[in-house]
């Protein structure tokens, strides 16, 4: 009796220990819902760093007009908030539509949807609420031109993610579309502060080119990380090769420098020396492309490279200081 009792105690202890482990869900079973905070993760609030381009647009508008209209700081902050909310809507749609592909990625398979922590239905309801909040703020608080920019940011996200267009699945056009959100964000910030006169086309071209430079570097870094598995993760990688991506990345960088140089020659020749710092930043980013765990795979997390970010902020400050002399 004592032996049988001891066995039962040991069996109960083993069962308790196994119960504490996260067992994988059986095939075909519905994944268990995660914590409510897991539903905030697809909105990628940590990616709002991209929307810092919005207040930069406002600062550039102030420099161009050499004045500070009343309420400009609040307008820039509201534009940043609206852009961030719209970005979160696009990020959530991206995660929903990319979940089958992310499940094949060595690191992205831990995202909330492929890992089973988040269900699509409740996430869509949350995303719709965020979208309505963004529309209300844009309608009530932003000038009409900035509101149109916010609408363009949302449409760009739809074209990038939604089939049958889904430019994300079209080689090289994926980078073109993803990068166009940067000049859109800059225009939102500019029009929020100075709605009467828009940003120069050369400035928008430079911002788009530099964004395309980083996004192409991201593709190259992912291709180097995934190797032969890259096309299984995303079909566009079947058309990519390291030499082609490197050539395109360099072309985008040179185009951005050319557009910025032409803009400064026309409007602020005194700021031309700052181009040397910008060129140095591009070379630094290019070097990071070839690191074993390149930060360009998640460029939104470049804040983990504080020296690079501080140098970038310093370059912007230098250009602004030279421009207002």
Image: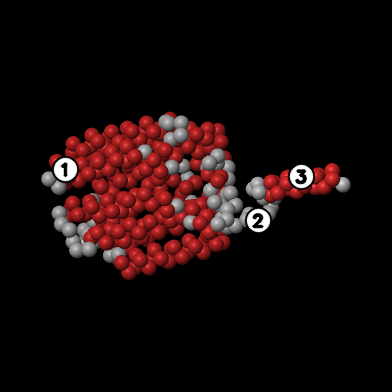
Q: Quick one: 16 or 285, which is closer to the camera?
A: 16
Q: Quadrant of the C terminus?
A: top left
Circle 3 sits on which residue?
A: 10
Q: What's the residue at 35%, 52% (across, down)?
A: 51
Q: What's the residue at 52%, 61% (across, down)?
A: 124
Name the element at disc 3.
helix
Circle 1 sits on which residue?
A: 322
Image position, residue 180 (x, y; %) = 36, 49
Q: Which mark is residue 305?
A: none
Circle 2 sits on which residue?
A: 30
Q: Are marks 1 and 2 in contact (CB under 8 Å)?
A: no
Name the element at disc 1.
helix
Spatial CA distance of label 3 from label 2 is 32 Å
Among the two numbered marks 1 and 3 on one chain, the one whose residue lies closer to the N terminus: 3
Q: Are marks 1 and 3 in contact (CB under 8 Å)?
A: no
Residue placed farthest to the right in the image?
Answer: 1
Q: Is residue 262 visible?
A: no
Among the two numbered marks 1 and 2 on one chain, the one whose residue lies closer to the N terminus: 2
Q: Is residue 243 left or right of residue 20?
A: left
> Relative to 271, is 154 above or below?
below
Residue placed farthest to the front in the image?
Answer: 2
Spatial CA distance of label 1 from label 3 is 76 Å
């Amino acid at each position: 009796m004592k032996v049988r009792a001891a066995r039962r105690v040991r069996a109960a202890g083993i069962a308790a220990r196994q119960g504490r482990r996260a067992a994988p869900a059986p095939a075909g079973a519905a994944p268990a819902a995660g914590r409510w905070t897991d539903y905030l993760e697809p909105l990628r609030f940590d990616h709002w760093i991209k929307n810092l381009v919005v207040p930069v647009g406002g600062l550039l508008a102030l420099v161009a007009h050499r004045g500070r209209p009343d309420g400009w700081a609040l307008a820039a902050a509201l534009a940043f908030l609206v852009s961030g909310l719209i970005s979160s809507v696009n990020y959530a749609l991206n995660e929903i539509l990319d979940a089958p592909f992310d499940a094949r990625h060595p690191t992205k398979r831990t995202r909330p949807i492929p890992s089973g922590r988040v269900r699509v239905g409740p996430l869509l309801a949350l995303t719709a609420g965020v979208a309505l909040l963004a529309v209300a703020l844009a309608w009530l608080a932003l000038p009409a031109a900035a509101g149109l920019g916010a609408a363009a940011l949302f449409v760009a996200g739809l074209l990038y993610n939604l089939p049958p267009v889904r430019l994300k699945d079209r080689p090289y056009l994926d980078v073109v579309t993803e990068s166009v959100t940067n000049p859109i964000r800059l225009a939102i910030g500019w029009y929020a502060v100075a709605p009467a006169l828009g940003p120069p086309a050369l400035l928008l071209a430079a911002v788009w080119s530099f964004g395309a430079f980083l996004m192409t570097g991201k593709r190259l870094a992912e291709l180097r990380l995934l190797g032969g598995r890259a096309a299984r993760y995303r079909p566009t990688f079947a058309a990519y090769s390291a030499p082609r991506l490197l050539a395109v990345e360099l072309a985008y960088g040179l185009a951005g420098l050319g557009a910025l140089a032409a803009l400064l020659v026309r409007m602020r020749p005194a700021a031309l020396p700052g181009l040397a710092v910008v060129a140095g930043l591009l070379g630094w980013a290019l070097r990071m492309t070839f690191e074993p765990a390149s930060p360009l795979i998640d460029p939104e997390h470049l804040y983990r490279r504080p020296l690079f970010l501080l140098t970038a902020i310093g370059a912007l400050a230098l250009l602004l200081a030279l421009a207002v002399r």
